[in-house]
Image (cartoon, rainbow, N blue to C red):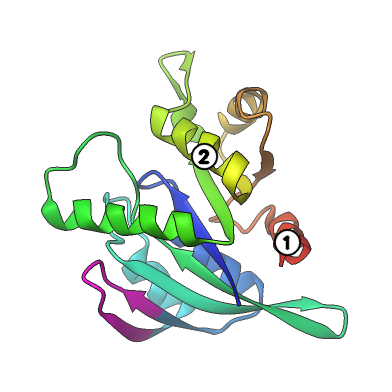
């Protein structure tokens, strides 16, 4: 079964996307397999709203382990299966917390192992005080994945006013990647994400 990794900086919207994409596909109950950096696995089941309330937060590093959910994508009269993996958010430099450093190392290991990479970039964070810039971390992910992986950038938070201007900037700078504009919160652009996944399964 193909494995698709959701990767990006902390608070980019990775967990929100994972939960709401499962909702978009008609899943009423999320059964997460949790893979801890130490190698242990466990399972946890959530109703969708409970998952949003517990797992989605504006705090950095709410997700500190791989959260894997098995999805079925309808195609014709059949379905294709996919393991979608939510990950610990990445930051530039060395994090002061040892546990988070381990979780980020786990994310990078899974990045190398994944069949498909969905790289979430927060459009709202591409500009500050009138200056547009893509972080070095996002550029490193882009430069690796565009060569090594089946890869798409999910340009998140298209529901915000600043998004369209920053989307054009992102498309210009990351012009060798497939870029899909989305709102993880409002499930916008999910049809194109599903189409991309089905094409590459």
**The magenta segment:** 33-44
* Residue at the (12%, 43%) spot, across then down: 96
In the image shown, does 157 or 106 lie closer to the viewer? 106
Q: Specify whether residue 158 is in view.
A: no
Residue at numbered disc 2: 144
Q: Specify whether residue 84 is in view.
A: yes
In the image shown, does 89 or 200 lie closer to the viewer? 200
Q: Secondary structure at mark 2?
A: helix
* Residue at the (51%, 65%) spot, across then down: 18
The correct choice, above or below, for 47 with respect to 198 in the image is below
* Residue at the (66%, 74%) spot, across then down: 25
- Judged left or right of residue 7, residue 91 is left
Badge 2 density bin: few <14, some 14–19, many ≥20, Cα 10 Å: few
Q: Earlier in the sequence, mark 1 or mark 2?
A: 2
Q: Quadrant of the N terminus?
A: bottom right
- Marks 1 and 2, how far apart in space? 18 Å
Mark closer to the observer (1, 2): 2
The correct choice, above or below, for 129 with respect to 41 in the image is above
Q: Is residue 34 magenta?
A: yes
* Quadrant in the rendering for residue 161: top right
Q: Quadrant of the C terminus?
A: bottom right
- Judged left or right of residue 135, residue 198 is right
- Judged left or right of residue 190, residue 44 is left
Q: Is residue 184 magenta?
A: no
**What percent of the width, then of the height, locates residue 106?**
31, 59
Residue at numbered disc 1: 200
**What percent of the width, then of the height, locates residue 51?**
40, 74
The correct choice, above or below, for 73 with respect to 142 in the image is below
Badge 1 density bin: few <14, some 14–19, many ≥20, Cα 10 Å: few
- Judged left or right of residue 146, residue 137 is left
The correct choice, above or below, for 76 with respect to 155 in the image is below
């Amino acid at each position: 079964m193909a494995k698709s990794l959701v990767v990006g900086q902390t608070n980019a919207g990775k967990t929100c996307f994972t939960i709401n994409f499962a909702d978009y596909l008609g899943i009423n109950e999320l059964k997460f397999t949790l893979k801890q950096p130490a190698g242990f696995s466990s399972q946890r089941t959530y109703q969708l709203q409970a998952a949003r309330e517990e797992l989605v937060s504006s705090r950095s590093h709410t997700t500190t382990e791989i959260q894997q959910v098995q999805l079925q994508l309808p195609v014709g009269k059949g379905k294709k299966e996919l393991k979608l993996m939510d990950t610990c958010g990445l930051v530039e430099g060395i994090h002061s917390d040892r546990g988070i450093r381990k979780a980020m190392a786990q994310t990078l290991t899974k990045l190398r192992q994944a069949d498909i990479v969905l790289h979430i970039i927060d459009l709202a964070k591409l500009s500050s005080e009138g200056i547009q810039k893509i972080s070095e971390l996002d550029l490193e992910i882009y430069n690796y994945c565009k060569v090594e992986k089946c890869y798409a950038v999910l340009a998140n938070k298209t529901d915000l006013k600043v998004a369209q201007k920053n989307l054009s900037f992102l498309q210009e700078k990351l012009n060798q990647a497939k870029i899909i504009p989305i709102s993880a919160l409002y499930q916008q652009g999910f049809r194109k994400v599903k189409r991309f996944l089905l094409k590459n399964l």
